[in-house]
Amino acid sequence: MPSDLLDGEPRSGFQEMLGYHLTEWSEDRAVLTLAVDRRHCNRAGVVHGGVLATLIDTSCGFAATFCPHPGRVRRVVTLQLTTSFTGQARHGTLRAIGRKKGGGSRIVFCASEVFDESGTLIAMGEGTFRYRTGSESPEGVPL
């Protein structure tokens, strides 16, 4: 199982429940992976759209909040999120790649793409995010 790159920050309850992992994280970029199992699927046996939307939202949020300073974090809240579903998955490992695209000191814009195990694009989205107080600068806030 991949190790998360959260540098001492505990996993959220939501992350534990869904089982995604932050596997790459750098300035303006984040990659999440998720091993699909039954809890992620809808009645038709395919990954639920809400799971894909979560991967889009979360990878975007991480892309906007990389903090190179140990013991410090940056946080955002989602203001707007759009999603488009272009395929489906039933099993395997999903990979969501989030990228910060631009913005200002408080509001930023990000995009994400979700790929199935064979590299096929199955979902994509864009979001608008607002930095929480103290997270506007790369120094972030104490953990």
Image: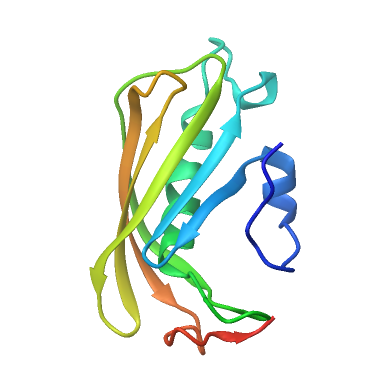
Depicted 115 relative to depicted 46: above or below: below
Depicted 74 relative to depicted 140: above or below: above
Image spot of residue 7 (x, y percent): 68, 67
Q: Which residue lies furthest to the top in this view?
A: 44
Image spot of residue 81 (x, y percent): 35, 53
Quadrant position of residue 142: bottom right
- Depth check: 50 or 55 in front? 55
Q: Residue at x 45, y 63 (%)?
A: 26
Q: Which residue is drawn at 49% across and 58% down?
A: 25
Q: Which residue is drawn at 35% across and 32% down?
A: 123
Depicted 6 relative to depicted 141: above or below: above
Horizontally, residue 45 falls left or right of residue 13, namely: left
Image spot of residue 6 (x, y percent): 65, 63
Q: Quadrant of the C terminus?
A: bottom right
Q: In which quarter of the image is the N terminus?
A: top right
The total of numbered circles placed on residues is 0
Image spot of residue 91 (x, y percent): 56, 16
Q: Which residue is drawn at 62% across and 41% down?
A: 20
Model colouring = rainbow
Horizontally, residue 134 falls left or right of residue 111, namely: right
